[in-house]
Image (spheres, rainbow, N blue to C red):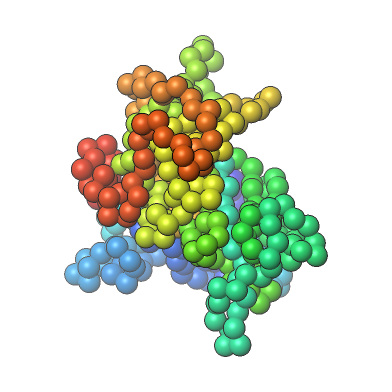
Amino acid sequence: MYTENEVLDFIEEEDVKFIRLAFFDISGKQKNISIMPSELPRAFKEGISFDASAILGFESPDKSDLFLQPDPSTLAILPWRPTSGKVVRMFCNIKNPDGSPYKKDYRNLLKNAIKKAKDEFGIEIYIGAEVEFYLFKLNEKGEPTKEPFDQAGYMDIAPDDKGENIRREICFTLEQMGIIPEASHHEEGPGQNEIDFHYSDALTAADNTATFKWIVRTKAASNGLFADFSPKPLADKPGSGMHINISYKSLRTEDKVDYLPYMLGGILNHIEEMTYYLNPSEESYDRLGEFKAPKYICWGKENRSALVRVPSSKHDVRFEIRSSDPSCNPYLAFSLVIFAALDGIKNKITPPNPVGDNLFNVNFSNGLKLLPDTIDSARTFAANSSFIKNILSQSY
């Protein structure tokens, strides 16, 4: 958690030659500008300008000047770059020319959600993301194919699991960048993998999720492979999810209320409206309801077929949203989830009874509501939602 002065000292003392200022378009795709160390004081004070009209979903050419102001607390060395003449990265706040926050900076929207949780409810939200991905081979031209790197299955080992060494490289790189990996294994699909990292405050969790996807793609490319984070890359195989684990800590020592049921109730109450942003691609709806991806709006204790699972744990108390997938913008997804949880607390929304049935049973039917099954229906739920409109009015 560096300060501006500490970053400036670090840059000078550690022979840093390039500084990448990272930010995200509205879909969550990472972008960056590289500057030289001599420009960093100006970046902290005034920001570095860029052409917003060239970024997906940002501004038109007649209003195209925006500024990147680096967040010093996000400083990280890129360990795969040369040790002599180091390269570092910082995530940035996007500013208007007058210095005000840019309305489509979802990192700032997430900050607003975090602030609301602390100021109005006296709690800090913690999030841990579990991101699945496929590794595919490249063709003779170096282009991605749909041929999986291996044919292994769930938690298989080498030699069937050929991704073991790549996951090892990824875990080491995560550690070098200050992200704590917890577990890694082969997933159910051929060439499908999962690496879980330690939970953190919501903003750090979003930063870590974005960094994780970048590291995975980088390490896959260095091994002659392509890392695919799409939700359903193979039609007849399991899709890839991004499970969101949520817990909280009360900042008021006298507060003895258990907010977790209300948080769960708020999320289930608003999940239809949020689905368009948690599952933003057409492929997302090919995944939902298939293999182990949920389709019913419900929760269950230890029930992996439910949309929200409350896991068995001797230590922390949390729940896991299982519908979202890696194509979403983590900053926007985490923001909506937090606002929905806070709405549950504010209005004391209690969740329905837990479901203990196997919802993957094709004969199951007991009147549970379904998630939207197409991107068009999800978009309609979002467009008609006052909850979504109120949140995005902070950014649009």
Q: Nearer the viewer, residue 58 or 365?
A: 365
Give left or right: position of 250 versus 101. Answer: right
Q: Is residue 351 visible?
A: yes
Give left or right: position of 104 versus 127. Answer: left
Q: Nearer the viewer, residue 184 or 78?
A: 184
Residue 262, compared with residue 127, is above or below; it is: above
Give percent across and percent down for residue 262: 42, 23
Q: Answer with the quarter of the image where residue 94 lies.
A: bottom left
Q: Residue furthest front?
A: 363
Give left or right: position of 388 versus 10. Answer: left
What residue sits 46% from the left and 67% below the top? 32
Residue 119, compared with residue 239, is above or below; it is: above
- Quadrant, the N terminus: top right
What residue sits 68% from the left and 65% below the top? 151
Give percent across and percent down for residue 171: 70, 56
Q: Residue furthest bottom?
A: 141
Give percent across and percent down for residue 103: 29, 51
Q: Answer with the quarter of the image where residue 341 lies.
A: top left
Q: Answer with the quarter of the image where residue 134 lies.
A: bottom right
* Number of numbered labels in the structure image: 0
Give percent across and percent down for residue 338: 41, 36
Q: Residue furthest right?
A: 159
Q: Nearer the viewer, residue 44 or 360?
A: 360
What residue sits 54% from the left and 81% below the top? 143
What residue sits 69% from the left and 57% below the top? 153
Q: Is residue 332 visible?
A: no
